[in-house]
Amino acid sequence: MSDRKTLDPEIRVLYGDSLQPPPGYVFDAGVATTFTLDFETALAVPVSLALFAAENRDDILSNPLALLEGTERIAGRLALFADAGHLHAQSRPHSRLCSLLERIIVEVTAPRGGAFHPKMWALRFRSTRARDPTLLRLLVLSRNLTRDRSWDISLRLDGEVTGRRDTRNKPLFDLLIRLPNQAVAGISDETRIVTEEVAKDVRRTNWTMPGGFEEVAFAVNGLGRSNWQPSSCARLGVISPFCDTDALDLLADLPTAKKPIIISRSDQLISVAPRTIEAFEHVSVLDEMATSEDGEEDSASALQGLHAKAFISEIGWNTVLTVGSGNATRPSLISGRNVELFVSLRGKRSRVGSIEQIMGDKGFGRLTRKFEPNELDPADPKVVEAEKRLDDARCLLCQGDLRLRCERNLSEDAEEQGWRVWLDPVKSLPLDGIGSLSAWPITRGDGHACDVLSGLRSGASVDLGAMPIVDLTRFLAFRMTDENEKASAVFSTGLIMEGLPAERHAAILRWTIDSRDAFFRYLRLLLSEFGDPFSAVLAVQEGAGAKAWATGADDAPLLEDMVRALCRGGERLHAIDRLVTRLEAGNESGADPVPAEFRSLWEAFRAVLQEQGADHAG
């Protein structure tokens, strides 16, 4: 939100910028929720939190060393909860580094069988200066953690963690504190602890209001007995990409002085009863030309489609803007099957704008056109039915009744790879209405897909093939079609894996740090402090490693950094010690990326660290 016009489409906010700590602060802990995510976008998040900002996701993904160190730094301090079975999958292999997200991503389900749908970040920042307060940032979004280019709405609230509970924050606390118990494939103790800690801090945070607004209120549907719905008002405006007749009837029947207005999507509105459409004063959809920059449809930066969600009420002299994850649908507003988060901001209409100013021709409405009831054909009922069968099967596959098992491959055949993976159903799964079902580890791609349908129906284990240790992962991709071939789906889910070798993480580390140059660049990353993005950016640049070390005049800065780290308590040096040890553990074959001259130097630092440890123990 900004001091400029509310929901002005000219105001753009970069996702990565919203994750950056305030000046003088560093990321300390966080909890995020999303309906769906893609692995690459999730993999870029730790870099944005712990190392440096980038113009776009691809800039971060092009630096595997930064991805590795970012994930290492925030491991155990970030929990990302997503709806079970709605992790994106793709045909090509995902980066092996995506397996590092196993400690971060937790799949959960909605208690009433609907979708787990909130999009939120609760981030805790600690100061690099003594006695400064702990800060907390709340991001409430309408978009998921994906590369989606739709029009969205984001709300950012910053606040200070105090010693007193704020009753306004209780709905947020209730949402966060219940997350660990909704996990379908278990949750680690460290993830449970960090989630509970952040939840308690959220409850004690005093928020600073965005410009023009005076009050904030939170609501969560799908957990308690009552559901948030817009209240009586003089006028109501709705922005909702998804909608249905039941929810729009509810909104149209609210006591208002004027008929409500709505901005939605054509493919949704064509399924709404005509009498319901007539109950709205204006029914609009995004103009296809307005959704691209300067009318150029092939623009790489174009925003296309609608994903923004908002309910805008005029009450007395005030405007109440409610944003969050909920659509104008029955599961979101009426039945409470979906878990949804809503944040309502109240401010004087003279300061934050009226519905006409926000949604009219001078606001977001300038991107819209009138909805024409006959512009699209209604959805094919057979396709809708097929998609429902796929959703039912997806839920069945993600309820915790599948396990992965890996075993060392004892074959003497030199061509065989080191580990074999099996998919084990706890019980037989009927999977009614499914015509085909294949699965593969996300690190392998669908070229290694195996037919699993008959095995899962009979309750038999399925051999997913042999693979190197660096390809072992708990994330399994599925592709399925319905029996009439009317619909298909590709998705991923994380399963409990038995027999995962302890050295797998070290092997991924060794695969990433595969040369002397990579080793020294990673070393510089380890020595860069939290809150020092400049040194982190320099560290990941090509040529910043072994070449610099090899020139006698240029190794001094690195040695100075190591000595400085030793004087500051040695935390960064302990990370280097773990790095060297793990590289040895993961080096089953191939050249050693750690130069002999560095090993000799490191033994001296290691001895000092051991002496410091002994002194502290004494």
Image: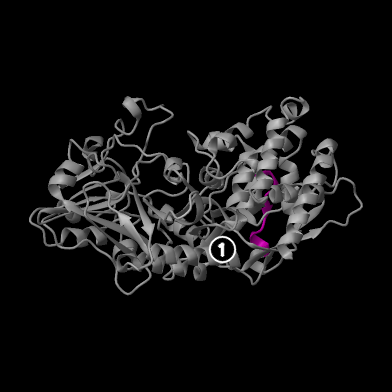
Q: Secondary structure at mark 1?
A: helix
In the image, 219: left or right of 197?
A: left
Task: Name the one closer to the observer, 66 or 549.
Answer: 549
Q: Is residue 364 magenta?
A: no
Q: Position of residue 32 (x, y in %)?
A: 47, 56
In the rendered structure, the answer to whether residue 178 lies left or right of residue 503 reads left
| The N terminus: image quadrant | top left
Give the camera-side residue of 613 and 479. 613
Q: Residue at x 66, y 65 (%)?
A: 403
Question: Can you give x and y, in whole percent of width and height, for residue 101 in the image?
Answer: 60, 52
Q: Position of residue 69 (x, y in %)?
A: 63, 45
The kind of residue tagged 1 is Thr
Q: Main secondary structure of the magenta part?
A: helix
Q: Is residue 506 visible?
A: yes
Front one among 226 and 504: 504
Span shown in magenta = 446-455
Q: What is the x, y in percent for residue 149?
A: 41, 39
Residue denoted by label 1: 191
